[in-house]
Amino acid sequence: MPDYLAVDLGAESGRVLRGALRDDRLTVTEAHRFVNRPVALPEGLHWDALALFADLSEGIAAAVAGGGEPVAGIGIDAWGNDFGLLDRTGCLIGNPFHYRDRRTSASTAVVAARVGAGALYRATGTPPLPINTASQLVAMEGSPQLDIAERLAMLPDLFGYWLTGELATEQTIASTSQLLDVTTRTWASGIIDRLGIPARLFAGGVVPAGTRVGPLLGHPKIPLWTVAGHDTAAAVAAVPATGPGFGYISSGTWSLVGLELDAPVLTDEARLAGFSNEAGVDGTTRFLRNGTGLWLLQRCRAAWADTSYADLVAAAAAVPGFRSLVDPDHPAFVAPPDMPAQLAAACRATGQPVPVGRAALVRCVLDSLACRHRWTLERAEALAGRRAEVVHVVGGGAANPLLCQLTADLTGRPVLAGPVEATAVGNLLVQARADGRLGTLEDLRAVVARSLPPRRFEPAGGARSDDAYARFLALLDAGDRI
């Protein structure tokens, strides 16, 4: 029985994993892990695409040469929005910009003005955001790079192109661009034209997850498959749900909280609440809000340098909770030079106790994230007219027991945590299905539940959690005081 390889690229790190499907159970082993280091240049913040490709290629080579069963396919997933531009010969024109680069601060308003925020949302299902591909391309107007570009490649598709020589744009990653028609799931040519973006960049069209792209260069028997190229779409495909009545939190650098629906929600209320309608596997809609997640903790740990996540979370669990809260989505936390100092300043500015010590700061972050999880889930339910009886937490946050318990307490729902490597698991199983070894999306999720059963957290919130949430709502209502 063949194995499959998943290339999973995240904002902090990348990894190559090997998946073996035996007797309707999946086993996953890590073949290679590497750091993702953005590069700050005078003209802006970039991803080091060449280093990422070198690292993932090293991981693929190690996995293929490692022995065992033959490899029947490779799939690549990554974060959304960012892209590379290719010239007429297929060469990359400069390193891709990072979505946190500040050049898009003014272009989001330009995007909304040219199309109209409501019309744009009804067409693409995505509200105007600085990180969107649309905002990034508008910010590049007048750039020589845009003048000579012939094709746009979302990041997982760019790396697939380098591996095979074939460029295919996958549907779920394209849906993060704000340039894909939310109904037809083809490029929104009218929106692209009104934004003044060259139509030639999108000449290749869009293909669904599970499409065979071509053989790897140097390995003619190993095909590249399009998987759910957006990491969140892959993670949601791997939610071990047993029915439709679930909410999900894809918890990592970002917290993506939402519902899986059969059709998009395109009301003005959904747009104003910041919800996106992104493509999922098998025509599903990921109705979600993209919020700041463990980025706050990641930047604190980077400032402290010498402490593991597990030790920080354990210390936070031992200190009193809900003393101080912040809005994780406040612009002040996008890219501060000193995250611990910024958190302290926010608490001071809002008249709350200033967290003293690492444990108190981490507790402030996790308490605040759990409050934001409740806020987002309840808004999603109200907008979609559907209740989630259980919340699945997948991704790195599933390994954080304090965050999972706090989320159960605040939402008042059982939380099922895992798999931690949900993105890679979804990547692997979409390949296996494309290869004819699995049937429906429900079959895929059943494999996850059997192979990687989630850990259950029961809600035990009570009046204390409700009081904390009321304070969090008051903090949001108070507006921008930091």
Image (spheres, rainbow, N blue to C red):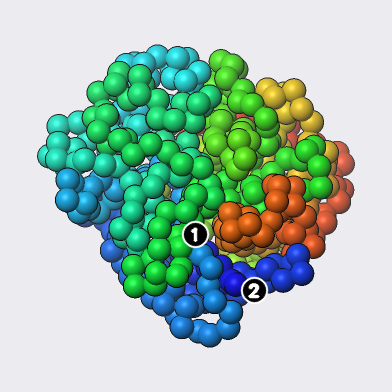
Please state which amino acid type lies under the numbered disc 2: Met
Decide which of 278, 475 is in the foreground and name it. 278
Q: In this view, does 238 lie above or below 179?
A: below
The structure residue drawn at horizontal position 68% and vertical position 22%, both measured from the top left corner, is 383
Q: Which residue lies furthest to the bottom in this view?
A: 67
The structure residue drawn at horizontal position 17% and vertical position 45%, both measured from the top left corner, is 88
Q: In this view, does 223 lie to the left or right of 268?
A: left
| Residue 151 appears in the rendering | yes
SS of the residue under disc 2? loop
Decide which of 197, 214 is in the foreground and name it. 214
Q: In this view, does 273 lie to the left or right of 129?
A: right
Picture quadrant where residue 454 is located: bottom right
Dot 2 alpha-carbon crowd within 10 angstroms: few under 14, some 14 to 19, many 20 or more: few
Q: Name the residue under label 2.
A: 1
Residue 308 locus on image (x, y percent): 57, 71
Q: Is residue 165 above or below residue 380?
A: below
Q: Mark 1 points at which residue?
A: 75
Return the disc, 1 or 2, that comes first in the chain's sequence. 2
The structure residue drawn at horizontal position 60% and vertical position 43%, both measured from the top left corner, is 281
The structure residue drawn at horizontal position 53% and vertical position 24%, both measured from the top left corner, is 183
Dot 1 alpha-carbon crowd within 10 angstroms: few under 14, some 14 to 19, many 20 or more: many
